[in-house]
Image (tube, rainbow, N blue to C red):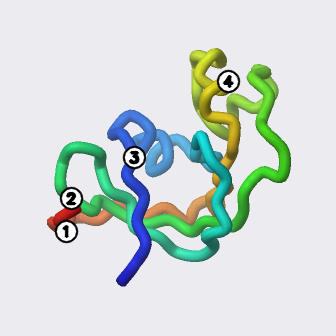
Amino acid sequence: MRRALIVKKKWLDKIFDEGKVWEMRTTRTNIRGEIDLIESGSGLIVGKVDIIGCSDIPIKPIAYHMPFHKVEDLELINKWKWAWILKAKSAVRYETPIPYKH
């Protein structure tokens, strides 16, 4: 069984189209390698990406990091402290999404 991450469409679009390489989360991860990306609320696997690491320390809400996480509202970074690091240019959006059951 493959691992998958459920992500809201807004952030998926930034991963696929805008070079978002930090997926901000409330917890750390030890997962490495290719995972599927599920669009939240859709029941569909819409693509895949490689996770290559996780931040060692909580990310601070400063504008310097915005090119990596693409979060405009820096207050959200107080909640989403951990960067799951995605391999640059590894995200692939599937032409035909794959249904899944949660």
Tag 3: residue type? Val
Q: Which residue is mark 3?
A: 7
At a point 80% along the width and 28% down the height, the residue shown is 60
Determine whether, in the image, residue 70 is placed left or right of residue 60.
left
Determine whether, in the image, residue 30 is placed left or right of residue 102.
right
Q: What whole-number distance in Å separates the C-alpha atoms at marks 1 and 4? A: 33 Å
Disc 2 element: strand
Q: What whole-number distance in Å separates the C-alpha atoms at marks 2 and 3? A: 11 Å
The image quadrant where one finds the C terminus is bottom left
Determine whether, in the image, residue 90 is placed left or right of residue 55.
left
Which mark identifies residue 68? Answer: none
Q: Residue furthest right?
A: 57
**Earlier residue among tags 4 and 2:** 2
Which mark identifies residue 44? Answer: 2
Disc 1 element: strand
Residue 53, located in which quarter of the rendered image?
A: bottom right
Question: Of 40 and 97, which appears nearest the observer?
Answer: 40
Disc 3 element: strand
